[in-house]
Structures are given as C-alpha cells and as structure tokens.
Image (spheres, rainbow, N blue to C red):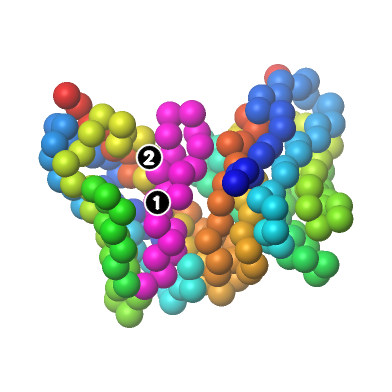
Amino acid sequence: GIQVEQSPPDLILQEGANSTLRCNFSDSVNNLQWFHQNPWGQLINLFYIPSGTKQNGRLSATTVATERYSLLYISSSQTTDSGVYFCAVTGGGNKLTFGTGTQLKVEL
Amino acid sequence: GAGVSQSPSNKVTEKGKDVELRCDPISGHTALYWYRQSLGQGLEFLIYFQGNSAPDKSGLPSDRFSAERTGGSVSTLTIQRTQQEDSAVYLCASSLGRAAYEQYFGPGTRLTVT
C-alpha cells in the first residue's frame, strides 16, 4: 500500500517563528489532507489539498503531486498551534493512510 | 452544522466483555469510516461504508470486530471478547462520497480494557 512519511518528527519553536512541515508519499493520490490533533485528541481539518496551493490565515499548504510531496507552512506561530500535525492520503482505495505525524511545541 | 458525533467519549471495560461504540455522521454524508489510534500502531483504518454497497472490512484486525450501519446513517462498531491490545481511541469519520472526498472526524471514543 501507499507509504506516507512526515518530517520532522518533532519541532520546538519560539512564539512568532515560522516553520515548514513536509509530507512525502510513495504513489499518486486523489486525496491529501492535513490535520491538527489538539490536546484533547480531536482531529481538526486544516487543508484538503490533493494538488495546488491553499492559504487559510497563518497557515498555507502546497502539494506537488507529480513529485509526491506536500508542505504545510505555519507563520507567526502561537502557543495554540502546539499539537500533532498529520498528513493523510488516499491512493484510490477506500481509506486514508496517515503519516506518523509531526509533534509541534510552541514556547513563549 | 453539526459535526460527526461519537458515544461514549470514554469506555472502561474488563477483558472478555463486549463493547459497542456509536457514530453519528454528518447529515447527508454517504460515506462513513472507522479508524483507531493506538500508541504502537498510529492511526489505522478499520472499515468503510458507502451508501448501500457492501462495506470494505479490510482493516478489521480480527473476527472479534464487526460494524454495521443502519439506514445509511448511524453506525455501531462492536468488539467482542475484548483484549488489552484493543485499548485505543476509536475514531469515526464521514465524507460526501468516496474516500477521495474530504473526511471529517468525530471526537473519538477512548476504550480502555483492564
């Protein structure tokens, strides 16, 4: 099945810093989603982005499907951005395959 | 509108007992998914329902696990004769159609088997 790798696994930032999270996948996809898992375990939808570029406030994402990667950009980070960020893809089957996540901690 | 809801939010059960977990998808969503999140296995797919089609059960870890979806809406995941390795957070998601559509997740049920 399709493989999803995320990097870095852990990231510590000072409030106000910018960061880039990466998601590599091993095959063509028809769905790619970025999620933020908050401290209560809820998966919050950030982007549905099988291709192209989207922006939502301080967050933006780019997926280059032909090169099999996606990037999530966080600008001017805040402590509320802390948590785990997951990339998940569907490669034509019936399920999302998740990466192992990036654990982000934003400090004052 | 209302999101995906799940109940109970927490469940503690003794080894060997049966448990039922409930998921209520977003109104109008024809596709429903169950996943689970555990420390050792990350987030993994369990089962997928789409309309009246036969469900995709390829992710169910053993025959102790089963799920049904009544009337194309609410779904129940049943685990029989629970084992300690079943302890995990069970997440339900729904989408407008096939898996290529954006999936929305519920808050999960945290299952602890003692």
Left/right of residue A46 with respect to residue B55 in the rendered view? left
Left/right of residue B67 with respect to residue B96 in the rendered view? right
For the residue marked with disc 2, what is the amino acid?
Answer: Val
Nearer the camera: disc 1 or disc 2: 1
Q: Position of residue B9 (x, y in %)?
A: 66, 28
Q: Secondary structure at mark 1?
A: strand
Q: CA distance from mark 1 to mark 2?
A: 12 Å
Disc 1 target residue: A46
- The disc placed on residue A6 is none
For the residue marked with disc 1, what is the amino acid?
Answer: Leu
Left/right of residue A15 with respect to residue A23 in the rendered view? left
Of mark 1 and mark 2, the one earlier in the sequence is 1
**Is residue A90 on the magenta stretch?**
no
Quadrant of the snapshot with the C terminus of chain B: top right
- Report the magenta residues as a range: A32-51
Disc 2 target residue: A84
Q: Position of residue B40 (x, y in %)?
A: 52, 39
Residue drawn at point x = 78 percent, y = 47 percent: B75
Q: Secondary structure at mark 2?
A: strand
The answer to whether the residues at label 1 and label 2 have Cβ atoms under 8 Å apart is no
Asked where in the image residue A56 lies, by quadrant, the reply is bottom left
Q: Position of residue B107 (x, y in %)?
A: 58, 36
Residue drawn at point x = 45 percent, y = 50 percent: A45
Indicate the chain on which mark 1 is placed. A
Magenta span dominant secondary structure? strand
**Is residue A38 on the magenta stretch?**
yes
